[in-house]
Amino acid sequence: MKTEHFSLKVDTTGAPEFIDITDWVKGCVGKSCVSNGFVVVYSRHTTAAVIINENEPLLIEDMTRFLEKICPRFGEYRHNDFSVRTVNMTEEESPNGHAHLQHLMLGSSETIPLIDGKIPFGQWQSIFFIELDHPRPREVMVQIVGE
């Protein structure tokens, strides 16, 4: 059994921002020399997600509207009430309750089969890293396990 890992630094520019990382993940698979196993794509953040979906501009607009509808940026969230919140506070803390709740719907990772050195994507599948909070440096990781 072989394990390889890779890391990508991403400077996001907005939120939500859908960043297609499919080619980077495929490149990691090629560098790994693993033929059969699985690939885990993982976000190191509680306000940035990883999903598999279609990279089509109008669908991305629909997904953006959906996220705003279920957890509006300017909704009322206890997490954003800095007059009572005392846990996990930093000097640059931002009111981002919406981003944490949107993350609940999306998740931190995707696990993808690796067969004969290839990711067997469906015709329209792409891997996205999604910024849900605000522009900043981020990191997405890939771990490839197999033989």
Image (cartoon, grey):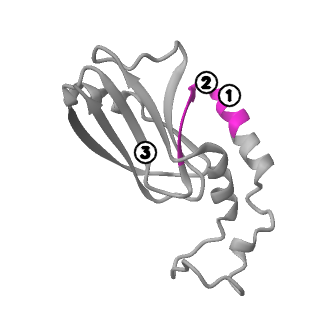
Does the magenta-highlighted stretch encompass residue 59? Answer: yes
What SS does tag 2 mark? loop
Residue furthest front in the image: 1
Tell me whether circle 2 and circle 1 mark residues in contact (CB < 8 Å): yes
Q: Which residues are magenta?
A: 49-63
Q: Counting residues from the N terminus, which is met first, the one under dot 3 or under dot 1?
A: 3
For mark 3, does the 10 Å Cα neighbourhood hold few (<14), some (14 to 19), or many (20 or more) residues? Answer: many
Q: Residue 59, labelled with which disc?
A: 1
Q: Residue 42, labelled with which disc?
A: 3
Report the residue marked by disc 2. Answer: 56
Query: Could you tell me which quadrant the N terminus lies in?
Result: top left
Along the horizontal axis of the image, is 25 left or right of 19?
Answer: left
What SS does tag 1 mark? helix
Mark 2 to mark 1 CA distance (whole Å)? 5 Å
For mark 2, does the 10 Å Cα neighbourhood hold few (<14), some (14 to 19), or many (20 or more) residues? Answer: few
Mark 3 to mark 1 CA distance (whole Å)? 23 Å
What amino acid type is highlighted by mark number 2? Answer: Glu
Along the horizontal axis of the image, is 101 left or right of 1?
Answer: right
Mark 2 to mark 3 CA distance (whole Å)? 22 Å
The percent coordinates of residue 49 (x first, y second) are 54, 47
Q: Quadrant of residue 26?
A: top left
